[in-house]
Each structure stands twice: as structure tokens, then as C-alpha cells.
Image: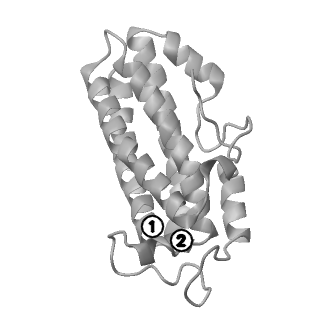
Amino acid sequence: MRTRTLVLTSATLITTLLLTGCAQNDNSDGMAGMDHGSSSTSSPTNSAQFNATDEMFVTMMIPHHEQAIEMADMILGKDGIDKRVVDLAQQIKDAQDPEIATMQGWLQDWGISADDSSMGGMDHGGGMMSDESMTALESATGVEATRLFLEGMIEHHNGAIDMAQPVIKGGKNADVIELAQQVIDGQSAEITTMNGILASL
């Protein structure tokens, strides 16, 4: 089983973002967060403009999304799961799979290899599930699997929201900022849905 983990806790992430706000490839006046642009459509010019906040978010969100899809696949492969949860797992997979491809495209445009980013290690920050928790989810069935998935995904989504918020304040790339806002809005709504399902189990 392939479980991807994050090296930074949310608190460390935010601190790092504040300390590394300099632009990595700044074609404007070097002031991070001041050139968000007016268009949300990717273009060669727009995709080339990014700063450390954008880069940190993208390189961390890719493995974060990958684990969410792995969790969704586990639930989708089980019998006897509440249909609401099956539908939610499919919704998460359908939303996050293309976002991974989009973010990988940004890294390619920026000349950054995901393999060379600051990912790795064994710290399960950012709401990431531990290996033990993933194993428990994989082994569980029925209501127990439903509960473990919902509790784990709520924590996972909260971690993603924590990761996205600094981009709204300090990101430079308009497309990255737009995705960060989508993460906040979409995953906040899904947390509400998951809490409602948990309460009904």
C-alpha cells in the first residue's frame, strides 16, 4: 500500500511560509502576494509567476490529495458501506484527481520536480493519516470502516484548509490562489456533510 506522508506540521508550514515569502520566479516587482492578476485561466505568462508560498502549497498538496484518493479507493472497494459515504468518496476522488494533474503541470511549468521537493519523512502533519490508521481503515468493514473514513477525512480536510489559507494571503499565482480557495470552500462543505453523517451512525 502506498501511503504518502507530509514532513511538516500545519504550524511549521505556516511559520515556513512567513519566513520564505520571497519570490522563486518573480517577474514583477518582487512583492509576494501583490500580483494576483484578474484572470483565473492558466497561461504561460501566468503559470510562470509564483513565489515560495505557491510552491510550498503545491508540493505539499499533491501527496495530500493522493492520500485522500487512496482513502476514497479503500471505501469504494468495500461492501456494506453507507451510500452517502460511497457517494462522498467518489466525489472526493473525482474532484482531487484532476487537481493533482493540474498541480503537477504547474510544477513542470515552474521547472520544479516533485521528487526534489521538501516532501518525505515520517511526520504526519497537515491532517495526513498515519500508516497505522491507513492499515486500520483498509482492514475495517461496515459501520466501523465508515466511521474511520469519516473521522480520518475530516482531519485530512482540516489539514488541507490550514495549508490553503496562507496562499490566500501570501500567494502570487492567480491560479494557485483560486485552487486554494476552492479547497477551502469545497472541503469545508464536505466537512459539514461528514459531520452530519457521523452524527447519524
Q: How many marks?
A: 2
Tag 2's secondary structure?
A: loop
Label 2 near label 1: C-beta < 8 Å?
yes
Residue named by callout 2: 171
Q: Position of residue 189 (x, y in %)?
A: 34, 47
Q: Residue at x 46, y 64 (%)?
A: 176
Judging depth in this view, the residue of 115 and 122 nearest the camera is 115
Residue named by callout 1: 177
Judging depth in this view, the residue of 31 and 187 nearest the camera is 31
For the rendered model, the colour scheme is one colour
Q: Residue at x 59, y 29 (%)?
A: 3
Which kind of residue does numbered mark 1 sit on?
Ile
Horizontal arrangement in the rendering, residue 120 relative to residue 143 (left or right): right
Q: Position of residue 109 (x, y in %)?
A: 50, 64
Quadrant of residue 86 within the rendered picture: top left
The N terminus appears in which quarter of the rendering? top right
